[in-house]
Amino acid sequence: MLVLTIYIAIFVLAYVIYHLVVGRSASKLGFNARKTVTFGDESAVTANRTASVISVVAIFLIWGAFTGSSLSPVHVPGPFVGDTSFSYTATNPQNQTDEATVYVRVGFIGEEFGKPEIPDNKQSVFAKDDAMKVGAWRSGLIRAQNNDDGGKIKGYRITAIDGQPIAPKQSVEVLDGVVNMTAKGSLSFVPNQGWQMEPIWLPAPETIVSRLIEISRDGYQNVALSENIGWSLFRVVVGFLLGSIVGVPLGYAMGLNDWFRGWFDPIVEFMRPIPPLALIPLVIIWFGIWEQGKISLLFLAALWIMTISARAGVSGVNISKVHAAYSLGASKLQILLHVIIPNSLPEIFTGARVAMGVCWGTVVAAELVAAEKGAGKMIIAASKFQQTDIVIMGIILIGVIGFGIDILMRMAEKILVPWKGKG
Amino acid sequence: MTEANQSSLHLDDQSSLHIDDISMTFSLPNGSAVEALKSVSLRLAAGELLSVLGPSGCGKTTLLNILAGFLAPTGGQVVLNGHQVTGPDPERGMVFQRGALFEWMSVRKNIGFGPAMKGVPEKQIRQRVDELLEIVGLHDFGDKAIYELSGGMQQRVALARCLANDPDVILMDEPLGALDALTREKMQGLVLKLWKETGKTIILITHSVEEALLLGERLLVMAPRPGRIHKEYHLPFAELGVDADLREVKKHQDYGNKREEILSMIWEMEEEIMGRKE
């Protein structure tokens, strides 16, 4: 909630500041600027690049601020770290009271730190000072009465913390945290957690970068990063190619022949809406969890998309083009090669882009279920060891690669079918 | 009606087109039948220029599709050069309203498509295409992509592509319908020039009375429901337009009279259709 509020505040603030600073003077020269009707005119709405930059910066700023990152100039309050103490009042069975202090040292988990020293200035009667260490964002349990004189006798109990009365299952706020009393009378100290996220939930951006460098150098669980990603890409490419090799001719046949159309229509229309992920259990039963299973799954994911786009490509051919070709003396085979296939290419490329996207999503999911190597395997293995930084790094890598695939497909489209959308 | 009705078939006449009592009846899904064409007969000698005019629904496009061989008539036959038309053939070239060009090929490839399909050697195709580019006034545009050309230029390519096959008959389905008025007038001049220079038989379908008058030695006015030939004219304007400015031809006294006559004829038919619908 807090993060969302801050995010919205940054959005509004950036908008206001941008329009105050840049004002209306900025882009008054273009044709769009002369339009009086812009609301509803989609062509007048172009992405404001300043907004895009601020948006990305804001995400990293919030991420950094809430993880104590060194990249971010501002931070929300972090967890309490350092030495603190609280006093407790013990009451013995004879109803005599005495006070002692618990010295606490709070440090980050994974860093070496010991219990604090107990200063030797105590003039207590029977209660004795204690020392404990607690990890930041965690809590520490101490039975403070254990070292007191007569502390283990029945009826000896702690009745107040820092002068505020306490009983089992109650809690008292102290200077740097909260003291809870368990049902059996032990004390549990929870140091202030602040607003920052613990690295186990969300690591700082630089941790992820350094983890990426480390993993691309040393690999993860004895598998190189390139090998993990290479396997995922290999499966996608093989599955997609197999799906296209079967799907495109099938789509052509469905577009050109009524018997094929009638025969495969029910199958295609039934299979198309099934999410490939829903097929994983069946594919595992039939083909096992290894390469054959995953490639079969990706084959099925790509097959229907490619079939439908090839069919649409054939159906989309303008009948006068076909008529013209017949009038110019082309045979059926020549019409297929010189008219129908080139005419369907833009449609097939659109399908191929969708299919590659679906395959990439499916391969990661399939690897989450079962795989030896692969991008999905890497993040699911890391999540089992609570290595959140590797999980996030993997997710970002998967996103970047998916985006890269789409860019490559678009570039290929521009080179191979330059007439797309210009018929 | 016309003398074509009485004419018998002369199969010995090797370079002529006989349209012999063509009928076309479709049945609709709701069971009723539509008579798109009823007993249409016509004889064209080689090198004649015929324009066909009529209100929508008079079956003129159906007639053209039958001539091209894309539709088989339910009655009658079309005979060209002594043999019956049964399907599309390069002897009958077609120019469509919107080019129907292959945008994945260059201008040059489009024009050379017909010869290339026949397996004519590359060198000969190139030579022929160069000639045609010159004829239609596109000599600098051979290597352009189709989508880089304007609508008028695309129709020039379509004409050249059709001519590359050296057809006996050229069928044009509203070839200039999608062009602006200025481009259209230029293209009308080009069609007349090509007709005169190549001596092809040309059948042109149009919605425009002016165009039908200019681009028809013979002009057929068709009537709807059932589609039939209503009236035939023999006109001098195409011949005049070969050498003269088309705008001069339009100033001709007779041109104006004929235009008014045909316009009111078509108006009447349209009114009749509207009346029947209500």
Image (cartoon, coloured by chain):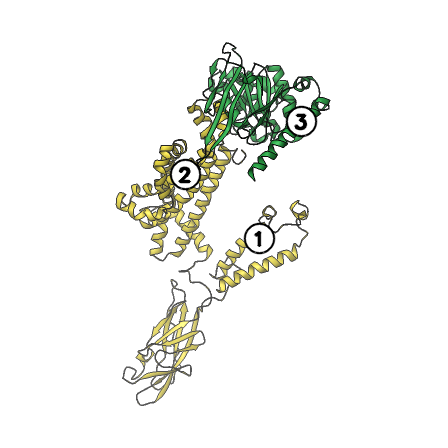
Chain colours: A yellow, B green
Q: Which mark is residue A51?
A: 1
Tell me if residue A357 comes above or below residue A153 in the rendering: above
One can see residue B82 in this view:
yes
Name the amino acid, label 3.
Glu
How far apart are the alpha carbons under marks 3 and 2? 54 Å
Tell me if residue B64 comes above or below residue A6 in the rendering: above
The residue lying toward the viewer, choosing from A323 and B133, is A323
- Secondary structure beneath label 3: helix
Q: Residue at x 38, y 46 (%)?
A: A273
| x then y, percent, for residue A219 | 37, 48
| x then y, percent, for residue A379 | 37, 51
Which is closer to the viewer, label 3 or label 1?
3
Name the amino acid, label 1.
Ala
How far apart are the alpha carbons under marks 3 and 1? 66 Å
Circle 3/circle 1 CB separation < 8 Å:
no
Q: What is the count of numbered marks?
A: 3
Q: Which mark is residue B261?
A: 3
- Secondary structure beneath label 1: helix
**First reached walking from the N terminus: tag 1 or tag 2:** 1
| x then y, percent, for residue A236 | 38, 41
Crowding around mark 1 (Cα neighbors within 10 Å: few <14, some 14 to 19, many 20+) is some
- Secondary structure beneath label 2: helix
Crowding around mark 3 (Cα neighbors within 10 Å: few <14, some 14 to 19, many 20+) is few
Q: Quadrant of the C terminus of chain B?
A: top right
Q: Which mark is residue A308?
A: 2
One can see residue A234 in this view:
no
Q: Quadrant of the N terminus of chain B?
A: top right
The residue lying toward the viewer, choosing from A379 and A6, is A6
Crowding around mark 2 (Cα neighbors within 10 Å: few <14, some 14 to 19, many 20+) is many
Name the amino acid, label 2.
Ile
How far apart are the alpha carbons under marks 1 and 2? 38 Å
